Structure formats: structure tokens, C-alpha cells
Amino acid sequence: MRERLAYGRIGVLGPLEVAVGGVPVEIAGGRLRALLVRLALDPGRYVGTALLADGLWGDDAPADPGNALQSLVSRLRRALGRADVLAYGPAGYRLALPPEAVDAVRFERQAHAGREALAAGDAVAARRLLEEALALWRGPALADVADAPFAAAPAHRLEELRLEATEDRIEAGLAEGGPGGARPGAAVPELEALTVAHPLRERPRALLMRALYATGRQPEALGAYEEYRALLAEELGADPSEALRELHVAVLRGEAPGRRGGGGPIGTRRGGEGDPYGTKPAGASGSYGTRPGATGGPYRTKPDPSTGPGAPGAPPPPVRTSLRAALTSFVGRDDELRRVRALLGGSRLVTLTGPGGAGKTRLATTAAEALLGDSPGGVWLVELAPVTGGDDVPFAVLGALGQRETAVLDNRHLPPRDVLTRLTDTLAAAPTTLVLDNCEHVVSAAVHLADHLLRRCPELRVLATSREPLGIDGEALCPVPPPSLPPQDTHDARDGRDEQATGAAVRLFADRARAARPDFAVGPANAAAVAEICRRLDGLPLAIELAAARLRSLPVEQVAARLDNRFRLLTTGSRTALPRHRTLQAVVAWSWELLGDEERRLAEWLSVFPGGATPESVAGVCGMDVVTALDLLAALADKSLLQITEAPQGANAEPSAGPRYRMLETSASSVATASPRPATSTAYGPRTPRTSSGSPRPRTRTCAATSSSAGSPCSTPSTTTSSRPCATPSTPGTPAPPSGWSPPSASTG
């Protein structure tokens, strides 16, 4: 072996050094040095001519790279003084030297042997081997050819191995112990320099904490941890690893390894061999910093069942979630909660749909809490309401997971990973649940993200809330209707003796009202007013909560009486809520803004018909075919603007009767009040005239559905302030649209 090494030596761990037959050789010319270094990185192996040309010239290759490369080889052979050092074959050129002739190869082998000795607990041998390996370095790797196109990646790899070997050598010194062992205090300056040069690297911090603790500087060891924790939070939005947190706790308790008289003498490794910070449970193996798959590596180590999570007396694993604790009680949704949980048991994507203010978010977060035990990867709430563009949706998910799209400072020259790749890697690691809340305004981006993640993360579950379905294969829909309303004109609703019998909406109002007025209770004196409030607000939880908040300044009867002007009345939402969740008008207006032009025109027309309409009646009134009318109605129903009422069944039912599409009173009132279109007509037909204050003018009710003459009065006309006729057009003989109106195309919706 010595004779073979004497034949030639090449050093690339610093400025290029070449010796042939024990005689130093000077290689002049940057291109010649680059060719020799490139071949030395694969000693004894052929390197193809195309690969060599690309590594030497990159995009600036000469017109005939083959001849140019052959010329360089001839010059290099003359410089080395021996033609047989560079061999040529069909596969290309190779450096005809044993691998041990290159210092980089010897360094890797010695460093690996030292790491194995450290993992085996032989700290003395480990320190000797690692010191010999590090002594081979004379400067930065590939220093003379750093600008060559091929050099960046191998130089970075070698520098990383050098840093790992340095960490291993310091750990071996701390673990060696005895009279001949390294003094922990001597390692502190070197470790402090490493933490400055690599601020986000965790292992030097851990070794610094151990060295400081071993020299009796416990407060400084704790300070080093706190500094690192704050840096991670600020730069990456992340936390220290579990191993470092355990070391921190051990230092706090005075049980950390390495301090004489505290936790055992230097070299006492409580966690057994390969313990990265001296805090692993006994039975775990591996040396921190080794590559995946290498001997002694810590990746995917199997914990000792006698001491790992779930063992008797072991603390429960930390809960990983961004769900927030609820500030109010959960009322009247027990059936829906059971339905959501059942759907999540059989589908990986469940979408809660419903109108704004129906309580989708609260139901989703409550259902997600039950999944904490089944989601080791965590249950993460992603609030999409503040997101303004579809491109920001992946970043919102990344932020919810506690990460930020920031390049690691130690790898500035490397391109940052794509955000979807980061999300996929994170969510595929363990069973995880994502709650995508308020998807409706970025529905396209939410659809593509959910589809991407679900296809690549087989143990991921997604629970979404939206005012319309996502429309992905495998999606399970769970409509969220308003809570049950009090019965119409029944004894229980009038006297209020049985609050449970009056419906979930009344129970919700009573609960929230007691928060505003602790002495409030539903009783015979106010039961009718409470029932009217719940019915006129369609049982929408947000509207009911806003009405209950008004009891701070108004009696319940006055609140009920003022609901004709509900949008000016119900404006006292939570100050911490988003602007579109603070008032009833803002909630309904948000749904309106999500509609297309044709959908808005049809919604304006439907807003004046309390009984709803069938596709046939809409087609007849608006002058469009039934298919187009059905598409528009279905689009509004998908966006939770309309409710579908099935036709009555039985012997007296009309054979041709189909479902009716009805708008909630709260949505209809908002459309009729806030629409910017002229008050006297719309694209689809006449609308109710309104006063300058926005309230409806008194008018005669018409029953277009029961009259053969378009717009003729009922048999019992009466003056009313209602903004709606008393019936719904159901035949083609109902009022026609104004002249000049053109029907939408058949592709609308």
C-alpha cells in the first residue's frame, strides 16, 4: 500500500497538492488543475468525456470540446511526467491511482471510522481517528478550482462532512473523561465560533450547552438554549427538536451529562450509545449528524417500549395543533357533530357547506378536536379568510404548520424548495388533519392544493368549510343547516315552559343572551319575542348571537320589533372577528360579492318571492329555457344562497311538481336593500319600490301564481309593507321581463 501511495498523492482539501513518486509536482494553469481535481473526485473510475467537458467549461464549451479535452489531457500528462497516470478507455478518462491516494477519500474513511467508534462508546479511539481525519485539511475544499462549473456541489459536501467530523470530535472529547480526557472548558470557544458561523445548526448548540454545564456555567447553558429557541422562532417559525428540549430540561434539573457531581461524571451517557445530547432513552441508538442509512444514524430509531410513549408512567406525547380553545359553549349541533365525525371516518375529504353565519367554522373545529388522538402529525387550522389571492393559499397552510418559506441560512447558495414540496414532505410524515376554513373566495386554489396533497399524502385528512363544494373526487359533502327553529304558533313557543322543546335556535339565543344579561331567561313573558327573532333570522347562529348581544341596550321585545331594519340593528359583533364577520350585513354582502352577473340578477328576482320558485317558473318569467334556469338555480344553491325544498309526495301531489328553490329571509332582505340596481325594476322583472331610507313602500300584494292575468291582485288584496308578493310565479303566464332585456346564454351557470 505504501508503495502504491508513494507512486502518487493528490490533495484537494485545500490548495491543490500533487506528488508523483514522492516528488512534488506543480500544475500550472487553472483548466489543468480543474481537470485533475475533477478526476481525483472519482479516483480509479472512468469519467465520461461529455461529463468532463460540461464540468470544465459549462455553458462556454468550445466548438469541438472533444479535441479541446484531448489537448488538456496531453498537457496534464506532460506536467505529471508520467503518461500512465491518466488512462483512457471507451468510457472516458480515469486517474490511475488507488482511492487512498486522494486525501478526500482518506478523510471520509477516517471520519466514518471515528463516528462508528463514537457510536460504540469508544470515545478515546473516536477522538484519535477524528483528529487524524481533520488534520488532512489544509484550507477550503477544492480551493484552487472553486469557480469551476463542477466544484460547488462536491465542495459543499466535503465542507459538510468536515463540520460533522468536527462536531463528532468535540463530542468525543466531552465524553472521553478521565485524566487524559479533553477539558470541557477548552471546547467552549470553538463551539461558540461554530454557533456564530452556523446559527441555525442545532448540534453545536447542544454541545455548547453540555460544555458550559460541565464547567459549572449552568445559567449560560440555559441562555444558549433560549437564544437558539428565539432565533428559530424568528427566522423559521419553528421550535427546537425534542432532543434539544430534553437536554434543556435536564440542565434545568441539574441532571445533564458531563458535569461532575451533577448527573454523573464526564462520559456518563445516560441515553446509551450514540445519544446526540446525552438525553436519549436507554436503548435508542445512533450518532447525531450521520446521514440517513449510515451506521449509527439516528433516523427512524425504534424507541424502547419500556421507556417510550405509551409506557407506564411515561408522559403523554405533546399535542400538535393550532386549534384554539373555544370561548363560548357549543349549543344545538350534536346531530351535525355526529354526522361530521362519521363522514371523517369514511372519507379523507369532508366539506361543510352552508350560508354565511351558519356556524360551519365552529362545527369544523369542534369535530377536529376529536381527531387529535388519531393525528400524530397534528390537527392544523388554516384560516383562509384573510387570504386575498389564490397564490397565497399554500403559504397560509405552511404558516399554520409553523413554518415559513425562508431559505436556510447555512445553505444560501442552494435554491429553496418549492412550497408544495415542503408541504408534501411535512404532511406525508405522519397521519395529519388539515382544517381549511373559508375556502369560498379562493376555491380554485383550495381545490388544487387539496387535490395535490391528498394524492401524495395517503394519511392526510382534510376538513374544509366553504359556501360551495370543492368538487373533488372522493369529497363527502355535509350541508350545515341552521339550528332547529321554534314551532310556529304552538303552546310551547308561546309560554316558553319547555326551553328544550322550542328548538336549538332558542337555546342558542338564551345561552348567548345570558352572557349579555346574566338575569335573562326564556319565559312566558318573552317566549313569543324570542321565537320571532329566531324565525325571522332563519336560525342563523351568527345573526342570533348578534341579536342576543343587543340585549345589553334593548329589551328582547324591542329587538324583535326592530328586525325590519335588521342590518342596522345587528352590528355589534366581536371586535376580534374579521370585518366581514362583525355585522350581519357584511356576512351576507360577502356571499353576494362571490356571485357572477347572471347569478346576481336571478338572486335579485328571487329575493321578492318568499315561497321560492321552480325551474319551470323561472324559465317562463325570465324568457330562458328550463335547462339554463336549472343551471342558474343550482349554482345559487351550491353557493348556499338558495335552499332546496322537495315537492310534496302523496296521492294529492301533482305529478309534474318538482323541487322549489327558496332564499332565506335574511339573504333576501340584504339583496332587496343593498342591490345597486334601480328600485323599480331588474333585468328579470319588476321589483318592489322603496323609500329613500331603504324601507319598502306600502303596496298591494299580488298573487301571480294564482291569477290568470299577469300581475292582477289577489281575491283579498291588502296593503302591506312586505317587500315580497304573497306567492311565487309558477306558470308561464306570470309577469314578463321588461322590454329590451335579453336572456342569458344557455352556458350560463
Image (tube, helix red, strand yellow):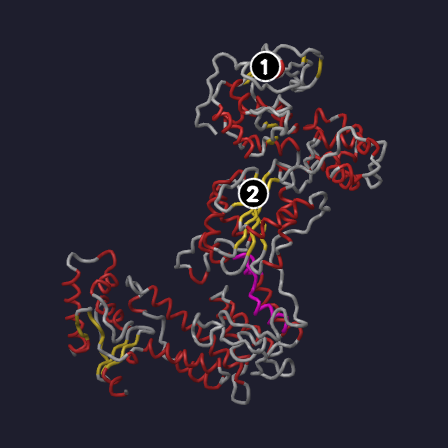
In the image, residue 719 sits, relative to residue 468, either above or below, namely above
- Tell me the residue that label 2 is attached to: 477
Q: Which mark sits nearer the N-terminus, 2 or 1?
A: 2
Residue positioned 59% across, 30% down in the render: 642
Q: Position of residue 193 (x, y in %)?
A: 49, 70
Q: Residues within 10 Å of mark 2 (few under 14, many from 20)?
A: many
Marks 2/1 in contact by CB < 8 Å: the verdict is: no
Q: Position of residue 459 (x, y in %)?
A: 52, 57
What residue span does the magenta drawing correspond to? Answer: 230-250
In front: 172, or 710?
710
User: Residue drawn 61% across and 30% down?
Assistant: 645
Question: Is residue 396 found left or right of 99 in the rendered image?
Answer: right
Give 724 or 200, whichever is nearer the viewer.
724
Residue situated furthest bottom in the rendering: 179
Which mark identifies residue 680? 1
**Helix or strand or loop: what does disc 1 sit on?**
loop
Asked if residue 266 is among those painted magenta in the image, a careful observer would answer: no
Amino acid carrying label 1: it is Thr
Q: Quadrant of the N terminus?
A: bottom left
Task: For marks 2 and 1, give the CA distance.
Answer: 39 Å
Taking the spot 66% from the left edge, 27% from the top edge, the residue there is 665
